[in-house]
C-alpha cells in the first residue's frame, strides 16, 4: 500500500492570548491519500479552519501545537503556493486591491514556476479562462473591485492553481455567496480538481456541499473529531449522535422562511424543534 499524502497524529492546537489559553483542536488523527477529497464539516468554531491552516503551515505565532502533521509520500512539508494551493473564504482578503489581477497571477507563476514575465502573463490569461472569467486576456488589466464577488472567488481559485500545486485546500470558499453562484463555484471546483488530478481538503459547514464534492468526510465539534469515513456511508448511517443531529437539522427547500431553526443540545446532541421545551 502506498503511503498517504497527509498523516495527522494526535494533533492539538491552542491559541495564546496573554495568560489565556484557548484549545482549538485536540487529539486529531486521520490520513488522506493522494488524489482523494476530504471534507471537514462542523459548526462555526469547531476547529475546521484551524486544522486547515495547520496543515498548510500557516498557523499564527501565538499558537502552541502538540502531535504531528507529516506528508509521508513527499518526505517533506509541501511548499505553500507551489505544492499546496489555498482558496480562502474571503477573496478580498487574498487579492491585492491595488494590483491588476493579471499582475497578481503572473507574479505567482514567476515565483513558483520560474517562467519569464511574458510567459507568466500568457499563463495568467489561461488561468482566468480556466476558471471561466469572460474575455480572460482583456480582463488581465482589471482590478479586483471591477469584478463581482463570485468572479473574485474564481480569480482566487486561479491564484491557488497558479503555482501548479498537487494539493488544494479550500476553506469555505462559497460561504459568502448566494446559492446560485455557490452552485456554480462548486461545479467549477469539482471540475478543476478532477482535471488537474488534485488532492482536496474542503472546509465547509454545509453538509450538502460536502456530500457532493468529497469522497470522505470528517466531522468536527469543539476541536475534536467525532467521526470520519466515506461521505456516502457516513451520512447514510452516521455512527456518532452529533453527526445524526447535524443531518436532522437540515431544512428542505419548501421550508417557510419564517420557520425558526432547530437547535442541537450541546450536552445530549438531541435536536430540539421550534416550540419544544428545554429539558430540565
Image (tube, rainbow, N blue to C red):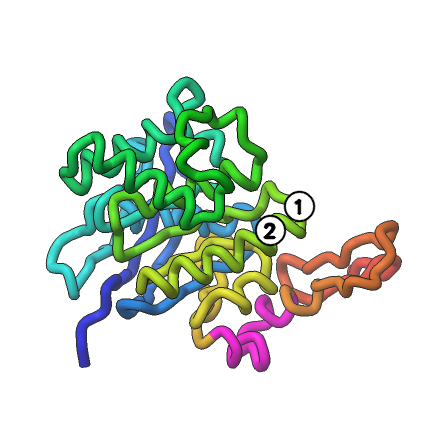
Q: Where is residue 73 in the image (x, y as percent from the top left)?
A: 16, 65
- Rendered image quadrant of residue 146: top right
Q: How many marks?
A: 2
Q: SS class of the residue under badge 1? A: loop
Contact between labelled residues 1 and 2, with CB atoms less than 8 Å apart: yes
Q: At 16% from the left edge and 64% from the top edge, which residue is drawn? A: 72
Q: Position of residue 233 (x, y in %)?
A: 51, 81
Q: Is residue 61 left or right of residue 222?
A: left
Residue, far left: 75
Q: Kindly report the secondary structure that dominates the magenta region of the rendered protein.
A: helix
- The residue pinned by badge 1 equals 178
Of residues 204 and 145, which is closer to you in this image?
145
Answer whether residue 127 is visible to the viewer in this image. Answer: yes
Q: At 78% from the left edge and 62% from the top edge, which residue is drawn? A: 253
37 up-or-down from 24: above or below: below
Answer whether residue 23 is visible to the viewer in this image. Answer: no
Q: In this view, does 113 lie to the left or right of 214?
A: left
Disc sitting over residue 152 in the figure: none
Q: Position of residue 142 (x, y in %)?
A: 45, 26
Q: At 32% from the left edge and 35% from the top edge, which residue is drawn? A: 105
Query: In the rendered view of the protein, which quadrant contains the C terminus?
Result: bottom right
- The residue pinned by badge 2 equals 182
- How far apart marks 2 and 1 lie (CA) works out to 6 Å
Residue 241 lies within the magenta run: yes
Q: Where is residue 41 in the image (x, y as percent from the top left)?
A: 51, 59
- Rendered image quadrant of residue 263: bottom right
- Rendered image quadrant of residue 106: top left
Of residues 5 and 154, which is closer to you in this image?
154
Find the magenta span and give its range.
231-245
Q: At 18% from the left edge and 81% from the top edge, which residue is drawn? A: 1
Q: Mark 2: few, some, or many residues within 10 Å (few <14, many ≥20)?
A: some
Amino acid at each position: 500500500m502506498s503511503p498517504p499524502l497527509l498523516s495527522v497524529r494526535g494533533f492539538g492546537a491552542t491559541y495564546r492570548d496573554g495568560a489565556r489559553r484557548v484549545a482549538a483542536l485536540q487529539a486529531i488523527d486521520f490520513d488522506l491519500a493522494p488524489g482523494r477529497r476530504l471534507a471537514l464539516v462542523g459548526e462555526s468554531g469547531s476547529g475546521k479552519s484551524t486544522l486547515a491552516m495547520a496543515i498548510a503551515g500557516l498557523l499564527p505565532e501565538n499558537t502552541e501545537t502538540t502531535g504531528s502533521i507529516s506528508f509521508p509520500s513527499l518526505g517533506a512539508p509541501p511548499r505553500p503556493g507551489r505544492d499546496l494551493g489555498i482558496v480562502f473564504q474571503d477573496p478580498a482578503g487574498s487579492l491585492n486591491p491595488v494590483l491588476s489581477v493579471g499582475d497578481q497571477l503572473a507574479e505567482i507563476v514567476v515565483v513558483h514556476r520560474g517562467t519569464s514575465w511574458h510567459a507568466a502573463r500568457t499563463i495568467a490569461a489561461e488561468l482566468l479562462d480556466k476558471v471561466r472569467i469572460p474575455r480572460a486576456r482583456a480582463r488581465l488589466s482589471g482590478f479586483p473591485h471591477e469584478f463581482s464577488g463570485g468572479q473574485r472567488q474564481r480569480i482566487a481559485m486561479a491564484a491557488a492553481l497558479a503555482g501548479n500545486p498537487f494539493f488544494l485546500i479550500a476553506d469555505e470558499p462559497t460561504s459568502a455567496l448566494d446559492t446560485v453562484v455557490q452552485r456554480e463555484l462548486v461545479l467549477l471546483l469539482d471540475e478543476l480538481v478532477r482535471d488537474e488530478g488534485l488532492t482536496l481538503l474542503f472546509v465547509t459547514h454545509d453538509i450538502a456541499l460536502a456530500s457532493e464534492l468529497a469522497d470522505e468526510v470528517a466531522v468536527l465539534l469543539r476541536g475534536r473529531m467525532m467521526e470520519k469515513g466515506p461521505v456516502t456511508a457516513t451520512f447514510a448511517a452516521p455512527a456518532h449522535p452529533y453527526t445524526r443531529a447535524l443531518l436532522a437539522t437540515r431544512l428542505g427547500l419548501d421550508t417557510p422562511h419564517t420557520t425558526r431553526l432547530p437547535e442541537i443540545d450541546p450536552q445530549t446532541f438531541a435536536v430540539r424543534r421550534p416550540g419544544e421545551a428545554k429539558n430540565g
